Image: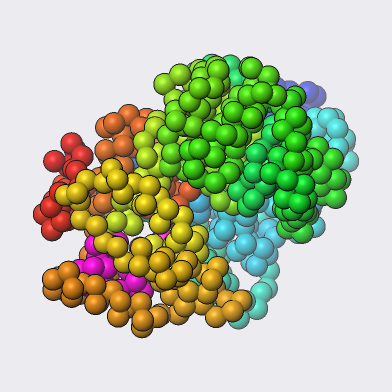
Amino acid sequence: MPQSSTVTVTRTDDIAWVTIDNPPVNATSTAVRAGLEQAVAEVQGARVAVLRCDGRTFVAGGDMSEFDDPPAEPHLPDVVQMIEDSPTPFVALMHGSVLGGGFEIAMACAWRIAAPGTGFGLPEVSVGLIPGAGGTQRLPRLIGMEPAIDVACSGKILGAEQMLELGGIDLIAEGDLDIAATEFIADLPDRPLAVSRRPLMAFPAEMIETKRTEITARARGQTAPLENLDALLLALRPYAVAQPLERARHLELRRSAQSRALRHAFFAERAVSRSASIALPRDIRSAVVVGGGLMGAGIATAFLTAGLSVTVIERDGEAAQAAALRVANLVGSALKRGKASEAQVADRLGRFQASAEYSKAAGAELAIEAVFEDVSVKQEVFGRLATVIAPSAILATNTSYLDPRDIFAGIDGPERCIGLHFFSPAHVMKLLEIVKTPQTSPEVIATGFALGKRMRKISVLSGICDGFIGNRMLAAYRREADYLLADGALPYQIDAAMRAFGMPMGPYELQDLTGLQIAWANRQRQAETRDPAERYVPIADQLCASERFGQRVGRGWYLYESGSRRAIRDTAVEAMIETWSHEAGITRRSFAPDEISARLMAVLANEGARIVEEGIAENDDAVDVVKMHGYGFPRWRGGPMHHAQATGWGATARIMQQISNESPGSWKLARRLA
């Protein structure tokens, strides 16, 4: 029988070498499964078989492109069982990532050898699933129930050192893995009891309920973490009984709304990065950040983490010193959180300086401003930069709302100008909106994407409009929330409804957290151009006029005790809302939580559809990725566009039409809704 092109078997004396070659991550596709099934037959007669992978990693999961189709034979659980039951025992020779189906295959091998730095995990939870080939049944038998819960219910990755300590692998091998395997086989220990036949290690019963409480709180409506816990507890039964139950539930969950949404999110994140391939990027090594406040310091920290040399420029020496301290604290926090070593922190700070002199920007290959959201202030920054920086250097604005064409007006070389919109805190948030102008060159756009990748961010290309993709949608979301407020809902009711939907916080809790003054300034900027037919609710303006700017001052939509972020209902604000409605002639009514969330989701989907129709976003995927990574939209709902698709655009259209009828002149329906 001819060998599979993705799985080959070669012999060296009494050792059979089984090699998987299925780029990029050796996923367990149908071809790989078929190749492994054939390989198990071919290795018989050898003293031992070594399972290894070409490329940068061991098997790093399943092929999710197959998950929407009926399962194709051979099924992974059957192949895994063949490996475990093979008369010729298998050694798993692992490097890179050993994830999902790859980890299930490795656990079926008699012995496991890993390169230093190899990562092990069952990330099925991140796509709304449980393992389907014995992962939840073998793992607690291999390393114990408590660490198995931590891995399967959260998607946690264990390093090789942790796995060795837990007894999950037999050896960490430095250097050439093939040589290490040959040496291990030369003095091969007795074949251990198959993992599926090992007794489950004892664990305290109360630990399960503690874990269940923790997982429920962390899940925020996502069901897969608890599904994984329940699947792990099946290991209390015999493996032959429990594993088919695991497999059946895995296949059921593939069809679930949450898994479909999470898989959509996975593929959408990869789709948006394709804009990076339009040209070859520059290799940026040095950057200057003008403005060392919270945003500028965060951007500087992100650049330093990505390996750049960074200069922060401030208005005077005192401000520069404050910026330097701010950046040092942010860089140092990575050490406290275990995200960097002392040597890495020292290296980053060694590539950093803060100054009040624009001349320090002379050698930078990229300059970005993070100053006050005012066109004239930003224009002044670039005017001063243009006198010292190379004419080929990339100029970037971090504006959240303003038109980059106005900011860069009069600057030579418009093809080098771009928007790089970071989200606060810039060194933590994963989203980067890359805003192109009509003149921005493909090379500069590609460089923005390459820099985003180095900072481990998810970059999304945006055209120009007020607020770009994310903040334009946020403005529509807040506007409908204000209409609900005026028509009968109260802030705590709207916030509770959105938390129940899966958002980390509601719109008014979020405003209090970020500060009401930012949106107030933006509304004032828009006042002259606002359509007079559009309904306008000035309640937030009244709060700002009373200097109720949110948590920072202890009062906004809610009250806050000193040192606490817990929102406390404020009867004075609620009375202000009711009074305004009465004076505006509005008869207030109650809104059920589901109606609140449905209306706000309809507005988001409508605005997202308009953004795509106008060419601001390339497609629905881009909108979904922006909302998930910049605004906390629940990943398990897949983003507002996927959510509208899953629930039906017809239903969204009906809700949006009702909203439009209630506030004439205030909404423009997207073509797909109209």
Q: In this view, does 23 lie to the left or right of 56?
A: left
Q: Is residue 139 left or right of residue 523?
A: right
- 13 or 653, nearer to the observer: 653
Image coordinates for residue 596, horizontal then vertical, percent: 26, 64
> Secondary structure of the magenta portion, mostly?
helix
**Res. 609 visible in picture:** yes
Q: Residue sitting at 57 percent across and 34 percent down? A: 380
What is the quadrant of the C terminus in the image? top left
> Which residue appears farthest toward the bottom when viewing the image?
571
Image coordinates for residue 614, horizontal then vertical, percent: 29, 31
Q: Residue sitting at 55 percent across and 60 percent down? A: 153
Image coordinates for residue 241, horizontal then vertical, percent: 49, 62
In the image, the segment drawn in magenta is 481-504
Q: Is residue 568 left or right of residue 308?
A: left
Q: Is residue 253 left or right of residue 334?
A: left
Would you identify the image quadrant in which residue 49 lies?
top right
- 292 or 483, nearer to the observer: 292
What is the quadrant of the N terminus in the image? top right
* Residue 659 part of the magenta-drawn span: no
Would you identify the image quadrant in which residue 105 lies?
top right
Q: Residue sitting at 43 percent across and 42 percent down? A: 401
**Res. 510 visible in picture:** no
Relative vertical location of residue 648 with respect to residue 550 in this rendering, above or below: above
- 152 or 170, nearer to the observer: 152
Image coordinates for residue 320, horizontal then vertical, percent: 75, 47
Would you identify the image quadrant in which residue 143 lies?
bottom right
Q: Residue sitting at 54 percent across and 37 percent down? A: 378
Number of marks present in the image shown: 0
